[in-house]
Amino acid sequence: MSQANANVQARAQEIVAAFKAGAATDVRLWVNGKEHLVPCPPPETTLLEYLRGQGLTGTKLGCGEGGCGACTVMVSSQPPRLGGGEADETAAAAAAGTVTNVAVNACLAPLCAMDHCHVVTVEGIGGLKQGLHPVQSRIAALHGSQCGFCTPGIVMALYTLLRNKPGASKEYIQENMDGNLCRCTGYRPILDAAKSLCCGGGGGGCPCKAAEADESGGVAGGPVASDRPGCLKGSVVGLTEPIFPPALALLPTYRPLFVGHQTQAWAQPVSLRDLLALVASEPAAGGGAKVVAGNTELGIEAKFKHMHPPLLVSPRAVPELQVLAVVPAGGDEAAAGAAAAA
């Protein structure tokens, strides 16, 4: 190792030591509106394993590699706040306070990545005791479930879609439900149920109005239900929707997180400097540090290739890496952070 590299490594170790000293060691998340504090979980523990261990068994384990969608849950979070740095503070301020709802494959999502997130499972939107959510009741009424194994994931994918875009079109529904597989029901009744809920902005209708939809070349407009006896009628107003927890919304920023567990550790820095130092602190010869965003690759490698890097680094709390902005510099240029999602 050259003297320059040795100096860089030493400086990185100093920064990492300071980071660890000030970092939390427990994962703090909310599940269906309730706060959960998980002390020092193994970094490779998935959200699915945790949820089922908590008795929330509506979320299923299917393929285990993010392909079938049976484990789908909704994860809500706020963008990280800047505390100074290289990113555009104006753009960050405009995004502050907004909540992003994303359908997530819980079989791949690391539990540690859920720090300061709100997870909503199928139990959180409705059930037999508290009453079914319209998404659940429509899928049941329109014969969108047979064995039922994949149904909770389909419900949560559709629920997230409707939370983000209530007036979705037929094409939008079909495109955004393609991550959920069903081997016995077939997709027609599932899509019919979805279309019956999307009644705004040129939205849907029940299967009784399918002919009208086909003739118009899109999703039928007008009322949700037809006049046929027994057809679904009325609005889709159901239970009170799960809200983003006020206690979580009041938190000023994401926090530094370092969870060390036997041979592997999880780090969540809140500055670009700390992230670079963490990556530089682990020599490649020892397996190196891996930056984890969606975990769609590393999760597969850990499960099926038995690859276990000693350090996993999450970029989700680094504001500079979440920016999506147009920067005027002699002409419009796009700036995209490495952890940004469109």
Image: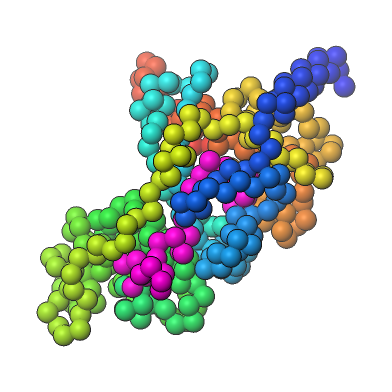
* Magenta highlight on residue 120: yes
Q: Is residue 250 visible?
A: yes
Which residue is pictured at 82% across the width and 45% down the height? 262
Q: Position of residue 16 (x, y in %)?
A: 73, 25
Q: Position of residue 35 (x, y in %)?
A: 53, 48
Which residue is pictured at 67% across the width and 56% down the height? 300
Quadrant for the C terminus in the image: top left
**Depicted 92 relative to depicted 100: above or below:** above
> What range of the chain is rendered magenta?
109-137
How has the structure been colored for display?
Answer: rainbow
Q: Quadrant of residue 50?
A: bottom right
- Taking the image as shown, residue 306 lies to the left or right of residue 151, namely right
- Taking the image as shown, residue 209 lies to the left or right of residue 330, namely left
Q: Position of residue 239 (x, y in %)?
A: 31, 61
Which residue is pictured at 62% across the width and 31% down the height? 256
**Depicted 148 relative to depicted 339: above or below:** below
Q: Is residue 68 visible?
A: no
**Depicted 127 relative to depicted 17: above or below:** below
Q: Which residue, as the protein is rendered here, is positioned at the far front?
A: 129
- Taking the image as shown, residue 108 lies to the left or right of residue 189, namely right
Q: Which of these two is toward me, 27 or 289?
A: 27
Q: Quadrant of residue 257?
A: top right
- Taking the image as shown, residue 209 lies to the left or right of residue 138, namely left
**Depicted 131 relative to depicted 105: above or below:** below
* Magenta highlight on residue 249: no
Which residue is pictured at 35% across the width and 70% down the height? 131
Q: Which of these two is toward me, 247 or 279?
A: 247
Q: Which residue, as the protein is rendered here, is positioned at the far right?
A: 1
Quadrant for the N terminus in the image: top right
Q: Position of residue 327 (x, y in %)?
A: 39, 22
Q: Which of these two is toward me, 154 or 280?
A: 154
